[in-house]
Image: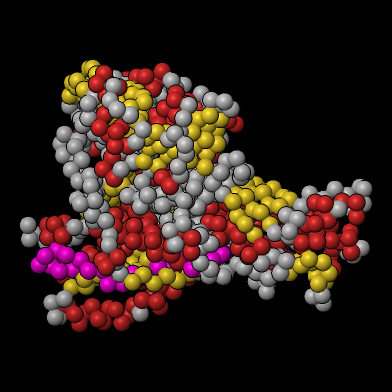
């Protein structure tokens, strides 16, 4: 069958592609039958708790664990120095693809010095968590407090303490993109506009905290790790290397995962320590982070200060854009993905979907005595899109142009691909024009403008925001193994096999954290083979059971893992038809598979059910020629070969109301048009977009990790760290344009992060649109009532 024939499979009566189905696990989890890491109970399980540094920066002079070691139920006390002796060495969170990047070595627990409030220093393992926490209270540590570095804007000053003296300064990484003739464009500019932006750091706050149950069996020398994680094979590699266990003797199982958002693609020192304890004790050890310690140990993200300037001509054409980004990361660069991907993406994304040639973007990433930052949902995009779309709105306002018309004039045309974005990143298969026009229709844009004008006359200030975007999904091999050197797979794989019953087992390297990955993979496989959905079972999240893969990150599960599933399913289909042709003495070109049966392609007559193929292929091989060996299975791998990412695109619209007396915002309506390529399951794609929008709006309006000058986190609890509530969120209407990517046969792109990426930018545009009559401008996120009132000059 040719590729064109296979393309017709997507639209045929046997297809499950494009069907809105509920998640396969929905009924089970709603009924309370989910199985999360903390639900797993093994005989003789002990539990770990940690003494964490109360200081942002301090030397450890002495640790006295004598009393704790003698307390009831305590089975092990381990300091950072003792753990270091049991490991192969520290982590260094650099990738060679980030030229000139530097980071200090980081041990799983602090050895001589603690570099952020919350860094683990001593582990206590006891028969239960309460006993372990009690013993932690009886560990005495003598500290010598060191002045911390807490402000990014002064981190590079000569008078600022250097966090890691061996590095020479606090600069982790710097990079500049300089394309075109930026200086010439500004010198000859008709209009130049400048702005400064501030983005506060926040964290993932997943519903299920970080969780791990390590079980080392001294008899077999096998280590099994149950963990709430997105990337089992990476965890297998990192833990094996760190603890000196052969990688093939490490099994990682990711059971049900209660949210991840990028948080759970990282290894954490306390998790390594708990695993080392299991090896030391020869018994299971569990560690479940509580909410308070999550705030000071989970990765953070998004602390940036940016200055930007744009020039446009009098006709409304963008001539040049320049940004200068200062990013404050934590005390170390996170291993193995680093803490600089976010800043790098800000450089790539800020120029957005627009067609101009002159672009300069610089970032300086500096170390601070705070929780390390790293990759969190929509890495860098909320910042870059917010800056770029705000500058576009400023330009349109200065020219007295409607923001929609300005975008129509400047977006890359839909017929202009393949193309290169202003940042130099190659892009293909995008649909900015189609998305913009669909959004305007969904919003009833002209009616909104009329309503806005009428309400302003009544003293009600509503704002309309538009924010377009490009989103890098499903990264290729350039960044990790290859030029990077980290144990992170950018390929993914699927093994699919026909069982004697006629059912199909599909094992995949990508993982599910509530997105419905198992459902989508099942739809793809069932379509490729020609079987009912109830005939297929998808297995994921177990390194002993699935082929090696990168797991789920960067919106790659469907785009990369789904393509591997499609190709494996296609190959199994052909294998089944070949065997059926031999049994039926028919040309395979005259046969098809429909609803789990081999049928005559032209008449639809059932010739043989797949259960019969399975039975003969497994039990009655004597019915087949001696020179034919049926496999009834297929394994395929897929990776990108042409582009660094599969880019998706879309556009958001927002309608907000601002109370200019109190500074409070009301989110009235939110619209999204998303082009994530071929839609496998529209319902699940919509929910990914909606969930992403809520998370993005939380970051734009509420979430902020607040530190004082001593590096103390001031709001490390759910009582003080604000997250969005359902009643505060608007109705979110989602539409789609389908432009399949040419990078794969399936044509799917990523969909999991664009809601988070663009929602902050569009709500900031809407707020500023509401404040326009006052001449007020908001450029800080989160956009709290205080920020609004400051912009209005009320406080």
Residue lying farthest to the left in this orientation: 795
In the image, is residue 311 above or below residue 660?
A: above
Q: Quadrant of residue 103?
A: top left
Query: Quick one: 365 or 54, which is closer to the camera?
Result: 54
Seen at 43% across and 74% down, the residue is 437
Reply yes or no: does residue 94 show up in magenta: no
Q: How did the renderer colour the structure? A: secondary structure
Q: Quadrant of residue 678?
A: bottom right
Q: Position of residue 31 (x, y in %)?
A: 44, 62
Q: Position of residue 111 (x, y in %)?
A: 32, 21
Reply yes or no: does residue 666 show up in magenta: yes
Seen at 73% across and 50% down, the residue is 633
Q: Is residue 714 visible?
A: yes
In the image, is residue 75 above or below residue 679?
A: above
Query: Quick one: 220 or 470, which is closer to the camera?
Result: 220
Specify whether 716 is left or right of 29. left
What is the quadrant of the C terminus in the image? bottom left
What is the quadrant of the N terminus in the image? bottom right
Seen at 68% across and 52% down, the residue is 496
What stretch of residues is rendered in magenta? 658-685
Seen at 52% across and 50% down, the residue is 511
Q: Position of residue 277 (x, y in %)?
A: 42, 27
Q: Position of residue 454 (x, y in %)?
A: 20, 82
Give the number of callouts.
Answer: 0
Q: Quadrant of residue 438?
A: bottom left
Q: Is residue 173 visible?
A: no
Specify whether 488 is left or right of 93. right
């Amino acid at each position: 069958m040719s590729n064109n024939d296979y393309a017709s499979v997507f639209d045929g009566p046997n297809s499950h592609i494009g069907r809105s189905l509920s998640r396969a696990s929905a009924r089970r989890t709603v009924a309370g039958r989910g199985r999360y890491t903390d639900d797993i109970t093994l005989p003789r399980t002990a539990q770990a708790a940690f003494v964490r540094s109360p200081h942002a920066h301090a030397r450890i002079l002495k640790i006295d664990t004598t009393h704790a070691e003698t307390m009831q139920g305590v089975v092990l006390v381990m300091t950072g120095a003792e753990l270091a002796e049991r490991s192969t060495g520290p982590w260094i969170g650099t990738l060679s693809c980030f030229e000139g990047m530097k980071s200090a070595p980081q041990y799983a627990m602090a050895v001589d010095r603690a570099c952020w409030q919350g860094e683990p220093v001593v582990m206590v393992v006891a028969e239960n968590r309460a006993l372990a926490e009690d013993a932690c209270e009886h560990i005495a540590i003598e500290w010598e407090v060191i002045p911390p570095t807490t402000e990014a804007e002064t981190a590079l000053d000569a008078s600022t303490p250097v966090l890691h003296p061996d590095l020479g300064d606090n600069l982790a990484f710097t990079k500049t993109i300089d394309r075109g003739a930026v200086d010439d464009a500004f010198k000859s500019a008709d209009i130049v506009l400048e702005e400064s932006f501030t983005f506060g750091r926040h964290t993932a706050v997943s519903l299920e905290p970080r969780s791990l149950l390590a079980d080392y069996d001294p008899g077999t020398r096998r280590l099994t790790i149950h963990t709430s994680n997105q990337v089992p094979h990476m965890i297998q590699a990192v833990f094996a290397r760190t603890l000196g266990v052969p990688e093939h003797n490490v099994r990682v199982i990711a059971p049900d995962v209660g949210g991840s958002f990028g948080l759970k693609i990282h290894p954490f020192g306390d998790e390594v320590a708990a695993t080392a304890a299991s090896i030391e004790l020869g018994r299971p050890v569990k560690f479940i982070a509580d909410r308070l310690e999550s705030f000071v140990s989970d990765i953070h993200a998004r602390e940036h200060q940016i200055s930007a300037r744009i020039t446009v001509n009098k006709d409304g054409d963008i001539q040049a854009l320049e940004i200068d980004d200062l990013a404050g990361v934590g005390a170390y660069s996170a291993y193995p993905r680093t803490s600089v991907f976010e800043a790098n993406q800000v450089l790539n994304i800020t120029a957005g979907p627009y067609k101009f040639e002159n672009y300069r973007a610089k970032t300086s990433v500096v170390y601070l005595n705070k929780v390390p930052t790293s990759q969190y949902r929509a890495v860098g995009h909320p910042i870059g899109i917010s800056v770029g779309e705000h500058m576009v709105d400023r330009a349109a306002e200065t020219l007295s142009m409607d923001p929609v018309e300005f975008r129509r004039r400047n977006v890359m045309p839909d017929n202009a691909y393949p193309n290169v974005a202003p940042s130099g990143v190659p892009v293909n298969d995008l649909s900015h024009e189609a998305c913009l026009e669909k959004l305007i229709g969904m919003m009833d844009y002209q009616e909104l403008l009329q309503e806005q004008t009428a309400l302003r006359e009544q003293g009600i200030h509503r704002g309309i925001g538009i924010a377009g975007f490009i989103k890098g999904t499903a990264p290729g091999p350039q960044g990790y193994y290859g030029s990077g050197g980290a144990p992170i797979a950018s390929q993914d794989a699927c093994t699919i096999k026909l069982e004697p019953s006629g059912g199909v087992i599909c094992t995949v390297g990508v993982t599910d954290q509530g997105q419905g990955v198992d459902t989508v993979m099942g739809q793809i496989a069932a379509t490729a083979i020609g079987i009912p959905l109830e005939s297929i079972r998808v297995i994921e999240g177990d390194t002993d059971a699935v082929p090696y893969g990168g797991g789920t990150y960067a919106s790659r599960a469907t785009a990369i893992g789904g393509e591997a599933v499609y190709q494996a399913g296609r190959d199994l289909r052909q294998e089944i038809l070949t065997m059926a042709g031999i049994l039926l003495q028919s040309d395979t070109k005259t046969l098809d598979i429909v609803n789990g049966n081999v049928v005559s392609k032209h008449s639809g007559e059932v010739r043989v059910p797949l259960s019969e193929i399975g039975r003969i292929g497994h039990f009655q091989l004597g019915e087949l020629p001696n020179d034919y060996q049926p496999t009834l299975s297929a394994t395929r791998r897929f990776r990108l070969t042409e582009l660094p990412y599969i880019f998706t695109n879309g556009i958001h619209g927002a309608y907000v109301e601002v109370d200019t007396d109190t500074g409070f915002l009301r989110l009235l309506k939110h619209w999204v048009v998303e082009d994530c390529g071929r839609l496998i399951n529209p319902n699940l794609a919509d929910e990914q977009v909606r969930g992403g929008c809520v998370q993005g709006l939380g970051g734009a309006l509420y979430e902020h990790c607040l530190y004082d000058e001593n590096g103390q986190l001031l709001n490390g609890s759910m009582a003080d760290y604000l997250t969005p509530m359902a009643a505060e969120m608007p109705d979110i209407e989602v539409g789609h344009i389908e432009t399949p990517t040419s990078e794969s046969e399936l044509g799917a792109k990523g969909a999991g992060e664009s809601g988070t990426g663009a929602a902050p930018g569009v709500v900031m545009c809407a707020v500023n649109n509401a404040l326009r009559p006052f001449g007020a401008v908001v450029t800080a996120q989160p956009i709290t009532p205080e920020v609004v009132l400051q912009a209005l000059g009320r406080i």
